[in-house]
Image (tube, coloured by chain):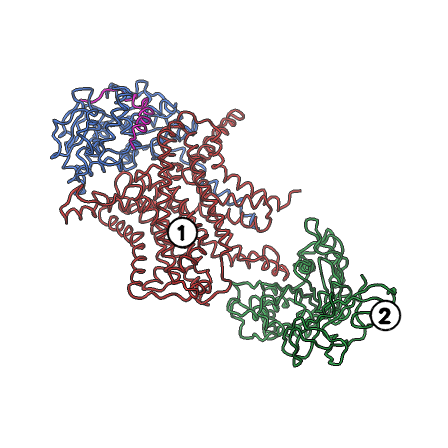
Amino acid sequence: MNKQLEVKNLTIAYDGKAVVADAGFELETGEIGCLLGPSGCGKTSLLRAIAGFEPAVSGEILLRGRCVTRPGTSLAPEYRNVGMVFQDFALYPHLTVSKNIGFGLRKLSRGESQRRVEELLRLVDMEDLGAKYPHQLSGGQQQRVALVRAMAPQPDILLLDEPFSGLDVELRSQLARELREILKRDQITAILVTHDQLEAFAMADRIGVMMEGRMLQWADGYSLYHRPANRFVADFIGRGAMLTGQVIDGPRIETALGILEANRTADLRPGETVELLLRPSDLVHDDNSPFQLEVLDRVFQGAEYLYTLRLNEETQVLCLVQSHHNHAIGERIGVKLDVGRLVTFRN
Amino acid sequence: MISGTSVWRGGVVLIASLLAMPVIVILGFLLVPAGEVWHHLVSTVLPDYVKNSLLLMLGVSIGVLILGVGSAWLTSMCRFPGSRLFEWSLLLPMAMPAYIIAYTYTGLFDFAGPAQSLLREWTGWSYGDYWFPEIRSLEGAAVMLSLVLFPYVYLLSRAAFLGQSLCVLDVSRTLGNGPWRTFFTVALPLARPAIVAGLSLALMETLADYGTVQYFGVATFTTGIFRTWFGLDSTAAAAQLSAVLLLFVFVLVVLERSSRRSARYHHTSQRHQVLRRYPLAGWRGAGAALFCFGILFFGFLLPAGQLLIWAVTTADERLDAQFLSLVWHSLELAGIASLLALALALFLGYGRRLHGNWAVQLAVRIAGMGYAVPGTVIAVGVMIPFAAFDNGLDAWMRSQFGLSTGLLLSGTLAALLFAYLVRFLAVSLQTVEAGLAKIRPSMDEVSRSMGTGGAETVRRVHVPMLKGSLVTALLLVFVDVLKELPATLILRPFNFNTLAVRAYELASDERLADASLASLTIVAVGIVPVILLSRSIGRSRHEQAT
Amino acid sequence: MRIGHLPLGLLLIVSLCLPPLGSAAEEEVNVYSARKENLIKPLLDRFTEETGIQVNLVTGKADALLKRLQSEGKNSPADLLITTDAGRLHRAKASGVTQATRLPGDDERMAGMFRDPEGHWYGLSLRARPILYVRDKVAPAELSTYEALADPQWKKRICIRSSDNIYNQSLVASMIAADGSEKVEAWAKGFVGNFARPPRGGDRDQIKAAAAGVCDIAIANTYYFAAMIDSKDQAQRAAAAKLRVFWPDQAGRGTHVNISGAAVTHSARNRDNAIRLIMFLLNDESQQWYADINGEYPVRPDIPVNPTLEGWGNFRMDTLNLDRLGELNPDAVRLMDRAGWK
């Protein structure tokens, strides 16, 4: 049984410097994956390697069980049957929308390719725009054309390089949902590259967090948020604060917010200093709580206020509270923990 | 194993080296002790050459700046009667080679010409009673060159002004600066790199000019080189003069390149905005229209009109078989040169795109610098090695095989075409590279991801997208070759005259009216790229509005 | 791909550049001429008509042609060099690009001063460089020699063309031969000081300027003046009508003259055809053409001059061997530079 995509211990390097180091992950057919990370983390290079534009120094890439990249050899992109959507869409300015979409359909007969183009135009609600030229379309429309153009030859895998970065912010979340719907409907396997977590959460089944060439964790969004594998992932995904504590025994840790439970037992030694991850939603407002913390800053977010609270000299914590609890800076607000086990990191 | 890549790279480096040869030959002469002739030059005429060249450059700078920046601002930022027309018609003086406008104005305004004669008739004055600007002087040459070269500054300034964010200018207004102050304190400094780049180009052309300064009796480097090489019969001293001239040119090239680079950072607006133009009403509008019309009139309408009159009435030269063969030769030569230049430009451009490494980058840059080298210098730098090669080869062949190969290169079209390529490849290269830049690498990659290989991608994507650039490149080189004078004078082969040479010969033989037919033909052909450029100007205006 | 087209294209271009081979069967002669095309082509066409020999012509400035001959060396395709000045002929001989020839059946058709004693070059037509004066402003009695023109009485009254021009260089060379460098340099400084304006334009421009009142004296070649007198253009005729010819230095060495001439190149492959061409240019018809149409003095004394020239009367000419003009040319140029003659 073949996975659609397998990347094993892949290393890509330029001029002796590794841009992707020992990365590995898998995608099943119909899954949508995402490579997430700050600029320079290697996510685009990894994507391009899957497409066949970059060679590997070590490791392998397999598409549908067939090895397409290995140190020393790399199957050319034109033979891989991958579809790619670029950040700048790369639409051919001299061809109409229909001709653009039909570009990769040379092998089909005229009638067949016409039908496929129409089908794809319908898919993205652009039936009567077939005769237009790219410069006559809006940004969102151009992105859709780029997408269905890549989909037209029915590729084994679709690769999207920051597909939303050229678009207005309001459009992005809506388009992300639409895109996911389209891909899921046709069970298309895809990998998306982005630096925006919200896009990643909206679109992908599995997300790989990358930093400095390494893949830190490959999991779904929930797991990344609530069960980050290491500090870097915890820092990158979502917001939060680190709380220092001392291990009493087993999962019990003593902290400035009282005795809390860690999410691991096995390797905790009593007396050890550890750090606990505190998400803003882990703290709730409670007027009766013994912990009355001073408000250092607050950001109005519509339904909630995000308060930055001073726990003690060294530590600040974040707290998300419904916005009708309006506390000014300098006031105190009572908070308590509303979580079972906390993610714990050893130093 | 020799790969396709290294063959291509090798080819690029080879071509660049060949094209750089004339300049290297000239610079090589710096190592030859010049001796006596050089000393004579230094003590007598060299200071004049330097002084005149500097004064000429100063005069032309003032001229093109006023004409170019002023008209660019008016047509891009303001609205006044005729502004749409002037937008493109202000380019027409580019169709006039400088030496032709020089002859024409001499015929018009010289002491014995119609303008002054009429004046004397009306007023009864005679020589010495009145002052009339002397056309055939350094000042006159500066005016002529300004009229013909200001479009460089015009085009680049216009692009800069149009690229400026409207907000930047509006902010200046809210801070209390009126439109004039805004122009001088905000718009002008922002556009400065582009203006300086245009100015450098105009000054390079000024230094390269031979026909105008020779006709007006202004002693500059180009006339000095001709004189020293031929008259004083010292190749070494002439080459040394050329080297000094190259120094001036080098300064300008550095200036132009660094300005172009910083011009990129001066582009302040990312989005296209609707261009609101300040309407100029009443006397302001009339003044603007008059200014632009004046430029158009003196830069094109008046000289073209005089040429037309001469051609029709007094010229002895009729449209006969001889003239037609002249036209044919010129067109043929220009056609071959432009095709060669295009082929080379494509080879170099693709070489840089596909297989670029530091050597290729450097080679392409060197190959693209020929536009700065004056035609005179190139001709000198071509003749010497070609003749040496031919004679050397012949001597070797004679000694080895008893065969005489004779002259293979010198005195043939090959030498002349080579000189044209050295000078004009830059034009072709720049156009082709600009066209290639629009084909982003992502387009190539998308193509490949869809299963379309390299050759098919070129056919289906590159060729249609490059079509416009290719035609433009051909046309620009075509017209430049047609107008070229000094190199053609020196290098042309047997039975081969061009329109430019004919016009020059007749004019310098004081048969101005007879030179008009050839001159008109050159101007007529020169209008075609102006029309091309004007269309792209119209398009840029349209884009701004969307 | 694209590369496939490259060799084909190269072949095409190379084939265009090679000198045509087919015409080798035809008789031809290759001429490098410093005379403007329209001044020599009619004669050359007549030559082809009469003899069937094809004439291939390259025109250009004499110096450029000379330079080209020198670079091309033994392989130069040129058979004949025609120039407008004796000095250049001498330079050609001195630089070794000419060869000695004998004209067949050569009687002393022309005076010895009009040909190279060793037979490297032959004069074809003669011109003088007199002083032209404005009729109403100058009396002939005031004029005498070239040297006298440096006198202060002529301040701001003289028009002459640039020192770049070969005719002026030869004039000064002839003066150096007669008076020596020092004297001539002193003369030149004074002469330059008498210019009405910095030199510009050609000989005709000086005549026009004098006619228009800019100056009272113009120095120009006789055939330019003749061309203006007989011109179709009314304005030129009117201008020329205001001036008269004065033959300088009739009491001394005589008026400076110069020739246009031809030399057979040392690399000439069509040597015999070149000699035939020279003979042709020296025959009655051609010499008459020079006289009638070009307004020049024929080198052959037995050919009559045209009426305009006749009207100027006979004059004594400077019998300096014209070879000297070439010898002294570099000195003349430097002297003029030092005197500030632009």
x%, y% of residue C253? 20, 20
Which chain is disc 2 placed on?
A
In the figure, is residue C234 to the left or right of B202? left
User: Which label sits in the foreground, 2 or 1?
Assistant: 2
Q: Can you identify the residue that label 1 sits on?
A: B152
Chain corresponding to green in the figure: A
Q: Can you see residue C29?
A: no
Give the letter of the blue chain: C
* Residue C321 is inside the magenta segment: yes
Residue A105, given in percent of the width and then of the height, sits at 61, 65
Residue B245 in the figure: left or right of residue B517: right
Front position in the image: A293 or A174: A293
Distance CA(mark 2)–CA(mark 1): 78 Å
Position of B536 relative to B480 (above/below)? below
Is C98 inside the magenta-drawn segment? no
Q: Quadrant of the N terminus of chain B?
A: top right
Judging by colour alone, the chain drawn in red in this rendered image is B
Give percent across and percent down for residue B280: 33, 65
State which region is magenta: C316-342
Residue at 11% across / 35% down in the picture?
Answer: C136
Q: Secondary structure at mark 1?
A: helix
* Contact (Cβ within 8 Å) of mark 2 with mark 1: no
Residue C103 occupies quadrant: top left
Amino acid type of disc 2? Pro
